[in-house]
């Protein structure tokens, strides 16, 4: 792994530890306040299934996976949750206990790159603000293919990926190196997704410009990004 990726991983780890150690899931004013609306909107598409197999890549402390497991608690529901950060999985497990979902949530410390997705295993694969942390564009494209193959017929994929990210020091306005392993141009990323998921039913496909602040080891970074959301259903 090259030194740029190592440095980004170190900085990212610090900023996630800072957030996860002071914010409680669903009890905070931060982004951990609730699951994303897109995931809430997907749940009805899966409610006819008796068993639901879910994979959450880069799950964090379970903002989306705890919600999904809770919604499907009356079914045979297993949510595999992958995160590179030990602390994220520790907090995820605490949250699973707190919400009575420890039988449904399986937290795994691993990188998205190294976690091999089994073909045709899942009804729902989600990756929210996570795939841009894969260490190279080649591995990113390989993972998109694995995600496509990992979903069963009529299963759903939900991808939320930042693109064309810019960061600057909020106080001094100095431009900073975006702390994301891959930072693709928006149109290129959109066409990669279109190519990989060709023949699927696109339930949602949009780009939203967002700006927000993020702690970066002692300074606050202001970030601007084009967030791509893709939700597809396999035919
Ligand atoms: C912005 S957070 C999003 C968490 C969660 N998806 C959510 O929406 O709340 C990104 C998460 O991805 C994890 N992460 C970053 N790079 C990763 C990688 N290469 N493999 C697995 N997890 C990674 C981080 O530790 C962090 O918990």
Image: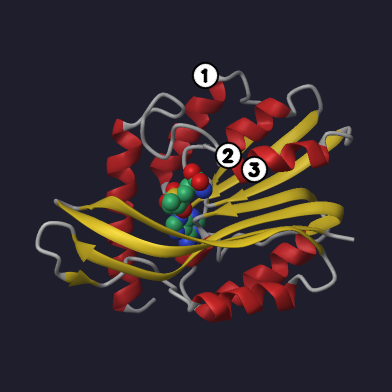
Disc 3 CB within 8 Å of nearest ligand 1 atom: no
> Badge 2: how crowded within 10 Å, few (<14), some, or many (20+)?
many
| Residue 84 seen anywhere in this rendered image of the structure | no
User: Going from the N terminus, do you reach mark 3 or mark 1 first?
Assistant: 3
Residue behind mark 3:
39
Residue behind mark 2:
64
Disc 1, SS: helix
Image position of 184 (left or right of 106): left
* Residue 176 sits above or below residue 18 on the image: below
Figure quadrant of residue 146: bottom right
> Badge 3: how crowded within 10 Å, few (<14), some, or many (20+)?
some
Residue drawn at (79%, 57%), measured in percent from left and top? 151
Distance from the alpha carbon under mark 1 to that under mark 2? 15 Å
Tally the marks.
Answer: 3
Distance from the alpha carbon under mark 3 to that under mark 1? 21 Å
User: Going from the N terminus, do you reach mark 1 or mark 2 first?
Assistant: 2
Is there a contact, CB below 8 Å, between mark 2 and mark 3? yes
Disc 2 CB within 8 Å of nearest ligand 1 atom: yes
Residue behind mark 1:
98
């Amino acid at each position: 792994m090259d030194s740029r990726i190592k440095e980004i991983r170190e900085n990212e780890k610090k900023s996630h530890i800072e957030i996860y150690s002071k914010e409680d899931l669903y009890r905070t004013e931060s982004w951990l306040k609730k699951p994303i609306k897109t995931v809430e909107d997907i749940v009805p598409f899966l409610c006819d299934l008796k068993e639901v197999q879910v994979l959450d890549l880069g799950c964090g402390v379970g903002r989306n996976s705890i919600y999904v497991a809770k919604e499907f608690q009356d079914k045979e529901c297993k949510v595999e949750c992958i995160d590179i950060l030990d602390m994220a999985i520790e907090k995820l497990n605490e949250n699973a206990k707190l919400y009575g979902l420890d039988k449904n949530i399986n937290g795994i410390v691993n990188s998205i790159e190294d976690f091999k997705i089994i073909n045709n295993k899942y009804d729902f694969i989600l990756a929210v603000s996570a795939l841009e942390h894969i260490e190279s564009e080649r591995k990113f494209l390989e993972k998109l293919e694995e995600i496509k193959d990992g979903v069963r017929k009529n299963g759903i994929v939900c991808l939320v990926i930042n693109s064309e990210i810019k960061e600057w020091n909020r106080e001094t306005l100095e431009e900073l190196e975006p702390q994301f392993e891959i930072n693709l141009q928006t149109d290129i990323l959109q066409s990669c997704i279109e190519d990989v998921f060709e023949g699927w039913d696109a339930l949602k496909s949009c780009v939203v410009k967002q700006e927000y602040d993020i702690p970066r080891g002692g300074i606050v970074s202001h970030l601007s990004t084009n967030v791509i959301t893709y939700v597809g259903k396999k035919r």
